[in-house]
Every structure is written in C-alpha cells, then in structure tokens.
Image (cartoon, helix red, strand yellow):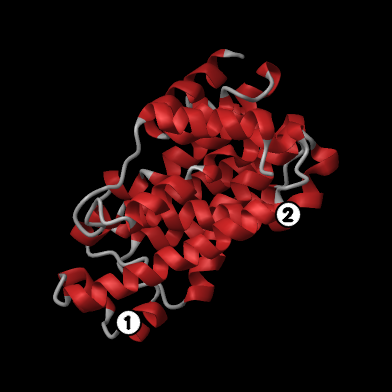
Amino acid sequence: MNAEQQHAMEIVREADRDRYLSVLFAPEGKRGALCSLYAFNAEVARIRDIIHEPLPGEIRLQWWRDVIEDGAPEAAAGHPVAAALLETIRTYDLPRAAFGNYLDARIFDLYDDPMPSRNDLEGYCGETASALIQMASLVLDPGKAQDFAVAAGHAGCAQAMTGLLRLLPIHLSRGQCFVPRDLLSAAGTTPEAFIAREDGVAAARAIDAMIALAGEHFSAFQRETKTLPAGLRPAYLPATLAGRYLSRLSGGKVDPMREIAEIPELRRYWTVFRHAMWGWR
C-alpha cells in the first residue's frame, strides 16, 4: 500500500467505520484500492458539512469530475485521495462514467429540495452506494462482478436508506428531507411539516414506511447473495450492517428524528466477521 492509499485508509478509518471494517477482510493487495474508493466517497459526502452555499459545493464536485475525466496523475497533484483514486481507476479499468453519475447524484446533497419520490430515492441510492459496491466488486473480482449487479443494487439501496435514516437528526437540522414526498404524503404529512417536526404521529408513520422500504431492499440483497463468491464478499460487508441498524431504528430504542442509531463496535465487528467467513446463507 503506497502513501496515498495509506492516507485514504486513515480517512476511511475515521470517517466510515463500517466500510473500514469490511476492508480488513479483503485481500491485502486490494485494500488500498478499496480504501481509495471509500475515501473518495467520504470526501464527497462531507462537502455539505464544509460549505455555506450550494455553488462552492458544485465547484468541488466539478473539480472531482474534471480530475476523473482527465485521468492524468498531474490532475490530482497535491491531493492524495484523488491520486489514489486515479491509480485505482487505471489499474482496474473502472468505468469513469459511473463516477460521473455518482457526482451528478451528489448534487442533491447540496440543496434543501425534498426528495420527490421513492423512485428518485432508489435512483439516488443506486448511483451512489450501489455504484460503490459495484466498483469494489470490479476491484475484487472483475470476472464475476457483473453477475451480481442486481445484488449490488439492492445492497446499496438498503445501506444508503439506512444511512439516511440514521442521519435524520442532522438532515432535519439543516432543513433537508431525504424521505420521499410520496411516502410523506401517504403518511399524512409534508416535507415542510416533517422538517419542522410538527406532526409526530404522521412523521412516525413516514419513518416506519422508510424503514420498511429499506428492509425490502435488505431482504432482497440477502436473497441475491446466497451464491455470492467468497472473493466478492468484502464489497457487500458494509451493507450487511443495515439489518442491525434497522432493527435498532424500528425497536423503539431510539427516536430517529432526534438520535443517531448506533450499535456496539463488537457487535458490528462480529456481524461483518460472520458474513466474511460464511456469507449469506
């Protein structure tokens, strides 16, 4: 693992503990490449945290787009995560268009527009979390990665939706609403009322619907991965923790609108370890 990849691994260890744990079960020679993907994701995900207006965020996303499309090492000079990512893209011939789609989807993060519909949410999750799983799969076993594209789609949706549910308190404090408008409407509320926490009963129904949607994708992910080769497992390990988080979110142990659901580190490690060793049976 070179210096840029080591730097990327440190970022993932601090910013994305679930994906960091999964990397530990990947072949040693692949860990640096996986960390470059996950560090890129962490860097883009934090843009909303460090800007005050959407335009600077769009400029940062455009910088990433230009670096990836250029592909030359000089384009990433002085940015170790970008340098590590470009090396991974070149080494494993990863599709640059997928990164462009990922960055396009992330524009939504910069604004306070509500998520329009369930289909839009699934599209967002597919272009972000599902795409990362597919990229990681191409790093691990390019010959078999495409055979499990459907599994990656469901796994990414389950993982991303669960993550959005966990981050509800942060999003609400910003005035953001990732819970789709059609789910809110069916629950008897609106994005504006949901953000303002004006109707607790309707908000609880909407959150339950979101948990159920994430659960549907999680169940489909588990079904699709029964024949997943051992070599691809590390790409899917972060998604397997969605089940644990969803159980906590739906168990009445936390208030999803005010508390971030967590699970103990040992339980997280055991869950990842168990599926790394024996898969999804």
Residue 241 higher or lower than 25, as above or below: below
Q: Nearer the viewer, residue 240 or 184?
A: 240
Mark 2 sits on what residue?
A: 149
What residue do we see at 32% from left, 59% from top?
A: 54
Relative to 3, is 235 on the left or the right? Answer: right
Q: Nearer the viewer, residue 150 or 201?
A: 201
SS at mark 2 in the image? helix
Residue 192 position by quadrant: bottom left
Label 1: how many Cα within 10 Å (few below 14, some 14–19, many 20+): some
What amino acid is found at the position of numbered circle 2 in the picture? Ala
- Residue 180: image x %, image y %? 40, 74
Q: Tell which tag, 2 or 1, sits nearer the viewer.
A: 1
Residue 32 position by quadrant: top right
- Residue 18: image x %, image y %? 46, 35
Relative to 101, is 227 on the left or the right? Answer: right
What amino acid is found at the position of numbered circle 1 in the picture? Ala
Relative to 209, is 63 on the left or the right? Answer: right
Give me the disc on residue 187: 1
Residue 268 higher or lower than 30, as above or below: below
Question: What's the distance in space between the residues labelled 2 and 1, CA to CA?
Answer: 32 Å
Q: Nearer the viewer, residue 251 or 90?
A: 251
What residue do we see at 45% from left, 67% from top?
A: 212
Residue 172 position by quadrant: bottom left
Label 2: how many Cα within 10 Å (few below 14, some 14–19, many 20+): some
Q: Nearer the viewer, residue 7 or 22?
A: 22
Task: Answer with mark 2 or mark 1, whichever residue precedes in sequence.
Answer: 2
SS at mark 1 in the image? helix
Residue 264 higher or lower than 240, as above or below: above
Q: Let me know if residue 85 appears in the view.
A: no
- Residue 154: image x %, image y %? 61, 58
